[in-house]
Image: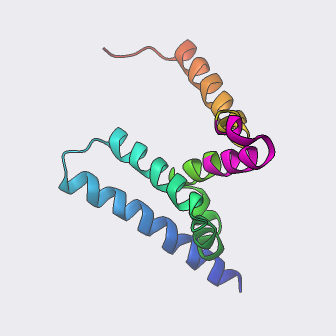
Amino acid sequence: MIFWQFLGAFFICGIICGIAQIIIDNTKLTPGHVTSLFVIIGAILEFFNLYKYLRKIGGIGASLPICSFGSLIMKGVKESIDANGFIGIFQGVFTNCGTIIALALFLAFIATIFFKPKS
């Protein structure tokens, strides 16, 4: 049965990345635009409770692409709205992904110490 888990992960992640590549190749959108678009798509799918089906089929393959980051943000917002009402919209953004953001900032800082830009 582990074969089907690997196949589902490969299939879902491959489709998500393939769609992103098609968008980049056939439009004037930059990778930054596509990244932002996929975060928003992940948040919308989580809002309508559809991202859980991608995770059910793809497992880690649905959790690796950037759209899962949007899903995590929306999940925290939904939980915070349930607990705190309207103010939860602003409080819940960093609930599930604050550690990830802090780690990314820390690693970026470390990279600036050891590497110099070429521009």
- Magenta includes 7? no
Task: Decide which of 41, 6 is in the foreground and name it.
Answer: 41
Seen at 67% across and 28% down, the residue is: 102
Q: Quadrant of the N terminus?
A: bottom right
Q: Is residue 24 left or right of residue 90?
A: left
Pick the front one: 77 or 57: 77
On the image, which quarter does residue 7 sit in? bottom right
Q: Residue at image x 71%, y 45%?
A: 81
Magenta stretch encompasses residue 82:
yes
Reply above or below: 104 against 12.
above
| Nearer the observer, 108 or 57 | 57
Residue 15 horizontal side relative to residue 53, left or right: left
Image location (x, y in percent) of residue 117:
39, 16
Figure coloring: rainbow
Total number of numbered discs in the rendering: 0
| Quarter of the figure with the C terminus | top left
Residue at the right extreme, as displayed: 83
Residue 32 in the image, given as x and y percentages of width and height: 36, 39
Q: Is residue 79 above or below residue 4?
A: above
Q: Please identify the residue farthest to the bottom as the structure is shown.
A: 1
Residue 16 falls in which quadrant of the image? Answer: bottom left
Camera-side residue: 53 or 66? Answer: 53
Drawn side of residue 34 relative to residue 116, left or right? left
Q: Is residue 58 above or below residue 75?
A: below
Q: Start and end of the magenta stretch?
A: 74-89
Q: Does residue 117 lie above or below 77 as drawn?
A: above
Residue drawn 61% across the image and 31% down it: 104
User: Where residue 28 appears, x then y in whole percent?
Assistant: 19, 45
Magenta-colored segment: predominant secondary structure: helix
Could you tell me which residue is drawn at 41 percent across and 60 percent down? 17
